Image (tube, grey):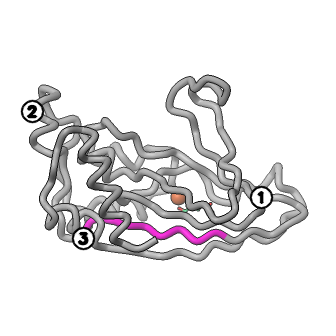
């Protein structure tokens, strides 16, 4: 997936909220990219071992390539028929050729909470090792992020304060991950 497609996706997601940030704003929100390569070796005691603890990603959108092993779980934000109840963990089954797109904290902040960042975790298995490659698109470190003014106005107030992304990132990396606690840094 090219950055072009992530930009398009951002435009669609913003369009659904009835806002149209200009191209330079969108580019500033996704302009900083990082690729991780995760290897989860087989684990003799998967029930005692965490692959990645529960967290949300800090950027705008994460594009994730996973192999065929599985082990990525996302927490349901609300009841979904035939899928599960709010608060339950749902495995995101690997689908050949498919990418997983995660919403990150930045998108939650700029949408004034309309989009929720996905809380997720990774489990391990005793029989197969796993590889995943997330591509994180994030705001430029000097970018100030806050709810888009049009949305804050419509909602009768901003639910998040303005933060410089660099500071958000420091807070994210300097504290142990505990679900979506990272977002509290930007809460008003
Ligand atoms: O391995 C995965 O599927 C996800 C990894 C992850 O959540 C992360 O690197 O932020
Ligand atoms: Fe993640």
User: What range is drawn magenta here?
Assistant: 132-140
The spot of residue 131 in percent (x, y) is 69, 71
Image coordinates for residue 164, horizontal then vertical, percent = 19, 61
The percent position of residue 126, horizontal first and vertical second, equals 88, 61
Say whether marks 1 and 3 touch (CB < 8 Å). no
Q: Is residue 98 left or right of residue 140?
A: right
| Label disc, if present, on residue 153 of the rendered structure | 2
- Foreground disc of the pair 1, 2: 2
Q: Secondary structure at mark 3?
A: loop
Tell me the residue that label 1 is attached to.
Answer: 124
Residue drawn at point x = 64 percent, y = 65 percent: 97
In-image side of 149 versus 109 (left or right): left
- Left or right position of 24 against 128: left
The quarter of the picture where the C terminus appears is top left
Secondary structure beneath dot 1 equals loop
Q: Dot 3 surroundings within 10 Å: few (below 14), some, or many (20 or more)?
A: some
Residue name at image x 31 percent, y 73 percent: 32
Labels 1 and 3: the sequence-earlier one: 1
State ligand 1's quadrant: bottom right
Q: CA distance from mark 3 to mark 2?
A: 25 Å
């Amino acid at each position: 997936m090219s950055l072009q497609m992530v930009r398009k996706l951002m435009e669609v997601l913003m369009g659904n909220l009835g806002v149209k940030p200009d191209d330079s704003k969108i580019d500033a929100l996704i302009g900083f990219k990082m690729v991780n390569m995760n290897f989860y070796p087989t684990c003799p005691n998967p029930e005692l071992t965490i692959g990645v603890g529960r967290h949300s990603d800090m950027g705008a959108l994460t594009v994730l390539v996973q192999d065929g092993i599985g082990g990525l779980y996302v927490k349901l934000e609300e009841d979904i028929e035939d899928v599960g109840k709010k608060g339950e963990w749902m495995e995101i089954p690997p689908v050949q050729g498919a990418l997983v797109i995660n919403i990150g904290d930045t998108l939650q902040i700029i949408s004034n909470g309309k989009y929720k960042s996905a809380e997720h975790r990774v489990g391990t298995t005793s029989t197969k090792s796993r590889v995943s490659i997330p591509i994180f698109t994030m705001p430029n470190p000097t970018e100030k992020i806050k709810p888009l003014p049009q949305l804050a106005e419509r909602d009768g107030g901003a639910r998040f304060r303005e933060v410089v992304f660099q500071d958000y990132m420091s807070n994210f990396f300097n504290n142990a991950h505990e679900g979506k606690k990272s977002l509290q840094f930007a809460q008003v």
